[in-house]
Amino acid sequence: MKLKYFAWVRERIGKSEETLEPPASVRTVDDLIAWLAHRGEAYAHAFETPRVIRAAIDHTHVKSDTMIAGAREIAFFPPMTGG
Amino acid sequence: MAVPVTIRIQEADFDVAQEIAMLTKGRTDIGAVVSFSGICRGSENDAAIAALTLEHYPDMAEAEIGRHAETALSRWPLTGVTVIHRVGRIVPGENIVLVLTASAHRQAAFAAAEFLMDYLKANAPFWKREESAGGTSWVEARDHDDDAAARWTKS
């Protein structure tokens, strides 16, 4: 699946997108955050406070307990500050 | 006839009068247009701001604003909606966002414009980075923006 990162999540990880295939044990958005956080220091820093991280699956906001099966694109970002 | 909905995300500035003229041109069913402009301030908590840089999630931003526009159309008898959100570097005094809502009567236009702005602030995937004398930093989301959006779902 394609992963996208925005704002300080993007800056901390050091890339705006990548394609990864997490193992089958990664079933929810929460699981994915925990799995990503173990990919190294940069990821650990980006996801150090999971409760502030917002997620979207295929361009729609989702809650952190949402199942990720079938997702083409999952994005992680901080709370939005537009308008 | 389908209600005209215009959604644009762009780096360029916009002309409010021209956007209103485009929305109302040739129409006789519009009795009210409400216009909200969000403008870049020159200071935040007494600290000077040199500029804001707005980042966005391209495909999702259009989709999310479109969903909000559809919700507004389903809740109020609107006859037109325009939402323009700028991205990139914006200096104090410049426009950031425009919401226009048109209706036969003012009440629907006022309410829908406020609804759209509250939803944009809390749910549209845009992020502001602030430049000041002390460097650059990401603007933190405010709880009251979430509260403002949530009040539309309480009733």
Image (tube, rainbow, N blue to C red):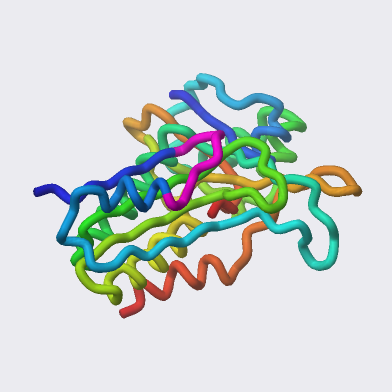
At 43% from the left edge and 52% from the top edge, which residue is drawn?
Answer: B17
Q: Position of residue A18 (x, y in %)?
A: 55, 21
Q: Position of residue B76 (x, y in %)?
A: 23, 67
Q: Quadrant of the N terminus of chain A?
A: top left
Residue furthest bottom in the image: B155
Question: Which one is nearer the viewer's eye here, A43 or B45?
Answer: B45
At 37% from the left edge and 27% from the top edge, which residue is drawn?
Answer: A72
User: Is residue A61 among the parts visible in the rendering?
Assistant: no
Please say if A6 is above or below A51. Answer: above
Rendering quarter of residue A6: top right
At 76% from the left edge and 57% from the top edge, which residue is drawn?
Answer: B42
Question: Which one is nearer the viewer's eye here, B114 or B93?
Answer: B93
Please say if B58 is above or below A78. Answer: above
Residue furthest left in the image: B1
Please say if B28 is above or below A44. Answer: below
Question: Which one is nearer the viewer's eye here, B46 or A73?
Answer: B46
Q: How many marks?
A: 0
Q: Magenta span covers which residues?
A: B9-17
User: Is residue B40 among the parts visible in the rendering?
Assistant: yes
Question: Which one is nearer the viewer's eye here, B129 or B94?
Answer: B94
Q: Position of residue B55 (x, y in %)?
A: 60, 38
Q: Is residue B83 left or right of residue B94?
A: left
At 90% from the left edge and 48% from the top edge, which residue is drawn?
Answer: B133
User: Is A7 within the magenta?
Assistant: no
Q: Position of residue B68 (x, y in %)?
A: 34, 54
